[in-house]
Image (spheres, rainbow, N blue to C red):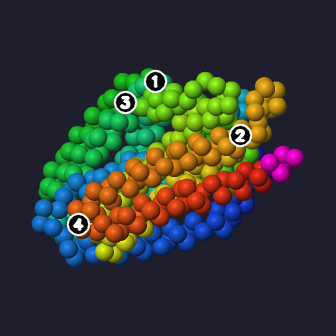
């Protein structure tokens, strides 16, 4: 039996994707891939139309920085490590460099491919704008920046102080954004000098900060968060046995739950509201909301498919946020305390529907606002009205049926 760290990495990777395969199948059967493909085709058509009708004052560099910075700076690392490894793998810490090389190859190749794809998407727009570099030099520069950020992200992981890790990460994103702006707007030699100075600056900062030989707890925590995100996503389509979610204090959203009165009949409303606000599910919904607002604004601004494409984008993100909100049905389904405390368990479905309806309506209004403003300004009032009316039909008519069906199937399983 091969007991090398290389074989351990391979076996854990295979086990994760083998266990995830049934959930991926359920996700594929839901129709999400088909809708995503339709959105991509609509986006490509809108992008082509934008390229043929670019205004003179179009912010080429700003769009490039906003579009490329996240994919260049974001450097996830799947290590498959678990909490028990603190006991069983620490004696083999001297061999973990080989283990990490597998993780760097696994994530590095995927990250480089994603950066190259994003750069290729931006290139037609860049050619219409400043266009100071040819396609291949720009692609090479973006890949080099990606490699530098991957190395810097690892140096941040080994830092002892969590506040230092957050501070360096924010600073790295800002410096990278400025570097991309320089790359897209100025001569190559100026960008190269800036990059060299930035690398030397960060190397000095990292060298003066306390760090671990191997950041076991940081890597285990990162892997645990990644698994929870997968579980939260998959739980929108089927019942997924998942680990407990950590509680995150989101002060900007606490006011919504604080409006719930402390009464016996509101116990489950209070519970589901805080579950949505303070767990990873709330973070996913907020990130999806931000992406929807940005995508909707761009689609509405470009008048995608005479405004009907923009309305479709609004409906798509209302549907996607609804899929994520459906994960609430899985929350507390198997909790023992429901049978211990004298709470009205029969009111659980009505509380779930109330929280889902309130959250869905709030998200729908926020997603529709860019369309209401931009489409109306262009005279596409019918399209803007169609977007909100169809969204309300989905939220108030179709979603409650889906939630009830999903809830009933889970209740049958419990029985």
* SS at badge 2: helix
Residue 302 numbered mark, or none: none
- The residue identified by callout 4 is 378
Residue that carries the numbered disc 2 in the rendered image: 348
Check whether the beta carbons of the residues at disc 1 and disc 2 lie within 8 A of each other: no
Other residues around mark 3 within 10 Å, as few (<14) / some (14–19) / many (≥20): few
Residue at the spot x=87%, y=47% of the render?
A: 415
Earlier sequence position, callout 1 versus callout 2: 1
**Distance between the alpha carbons at the discs numbered 2 and 3:** 42 Å
Of tags 2 and 3, which is closer to the observer?
2
Residue at 28% x, 37% y is 200
Q: Measured from the top left, where is residue 353 in percent x and y?
A: 63, 46
Q: Does the residue at mark 1 contact the one at mark 3 (Cβ under 8 Å)?
A: no
Q: Residue under circle 1? A: 161
User: Given contact means CB atoms under 8 Å apart, are the residues at marks 4 and 3 in contact?
Assistant: no
First in sequence: mark 2 vs mark 3: 3
Question: Measured from the top left, where is residue 49 in percent x and y?
Answer: 28, 75
Q: For the residues labelled 2 and 3, say whether their Cβ atoms are less than 8 Å apart.
A: no
Quadrant for residue 355, please give it.
Answer: top right
User: Mark 1 or mark 3, which has the lower sequence index?
Assistant: 1
Q: Nearer the viewer, mark 4 or mark 1?
A: 4
Residue 386 visible in the picture = yes
Q: Measure the C-alpha gap from mark 4 to mark 1.
A: 51 Å
Q: Position of residue 331 (x, y in %)?
A: 68, 41
Residue 47 part of the magenta-drawn span? no
Label 4 to label 3: alpha-carbon separation: 42 Å
The disc placed on residue 167 is: 3
Magenta residues span 411-415
- Give the residue at x 19% y 46%: 193
Q: Within 10 Å of the Cα at label 1, are there few (<14), some (14-19), or many (20+) other Cα atoms?
A: some
Task: In this rendered view, identify the residue nearer to me: 342 or 105.
Answer: 342
On screen, residue 223 versus residue 117, left or right, reads right
């Amino acid at each position: 039996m091969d007991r090398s760290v290389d074989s351990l990495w391979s076996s854990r990777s295979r086990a994760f994707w083998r266990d995830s395969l049934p959930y991926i199948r359920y996700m594929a059967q839901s129709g999400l891939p088909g809708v995503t493909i339709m959105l991509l085709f609509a986006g490509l058509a809108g992008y082509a139309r934008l390229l043929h009708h670019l205004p003179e004052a179009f912010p080429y560099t700003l769009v490039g920085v906003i579009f490329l910075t996240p994919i260049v700076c974001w450097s996830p690392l799947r290590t498959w490590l678990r909490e028990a490894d603190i006991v069983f793998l620490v004696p083999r810490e001297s061999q973990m460099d080989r283990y990490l090389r597998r993780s760097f190859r696994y994530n590095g190749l995927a990250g480089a491919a994603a950066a190259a794809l994003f750069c290729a998407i931006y290139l037609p727009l860049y050619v219409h704008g400043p266009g100071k570099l040819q396609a291949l030099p720009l692609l090479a520069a973006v890949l080099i920046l990606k490699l530098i950020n991957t190395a810097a992200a690892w140096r941040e992981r080994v830092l002892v102080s969590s506040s230092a890790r957050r501070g360096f990460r924010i600073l790295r994103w800002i410096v990278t954004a400025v570097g991309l702006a320089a790359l897209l707007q100025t001569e190559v030699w100026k960008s190269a000098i800036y990059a060299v100075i930035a690398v030397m600056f960060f190397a000095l900062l990292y060298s003066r900060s306390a760090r671990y030989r191997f950041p076991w707890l940081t890597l285990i925590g990162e892997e645990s968060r990644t698994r929870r995100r997968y579980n939260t996503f998959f739980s929108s389509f089927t019942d997924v046995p998942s680990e407990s979610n950590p509680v995150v204090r989101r002060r900007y959203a606490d006011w919504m739950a604080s409006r719930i009165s402390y009464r016996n009949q509101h116990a489950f409303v209070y519970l589901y509201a805080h579950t949505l606000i303070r767990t990873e599910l709330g973070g996913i919904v907020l990130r999806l909301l931000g992406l929807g607002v940005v995508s909707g604004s761009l689609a509405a601004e470009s008048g995608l498919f005479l405004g009907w494409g923009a309305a479709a984008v609004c409906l798509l993100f209302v549907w996607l946020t609804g899929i994520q909100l459906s994960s609430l049905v899985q929350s507390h389904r198997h909790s023992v305390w429901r049978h211990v405390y004298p709470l009205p368990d029969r009111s659980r479905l009505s509380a779930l529907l109330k929280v889902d309806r309130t959250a869905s309506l709030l998200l729908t209004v926020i997603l529709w606002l860019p369309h209401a403003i931009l489409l109306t300004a262009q005279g596409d009032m019918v399209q803007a009205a169609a977007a909100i009316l169809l969204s309300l039909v989905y939220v108030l008519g179709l979603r409650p049926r889906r939630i009830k069906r999903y809830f009933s199937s889970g209740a049958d399983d419990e029985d």
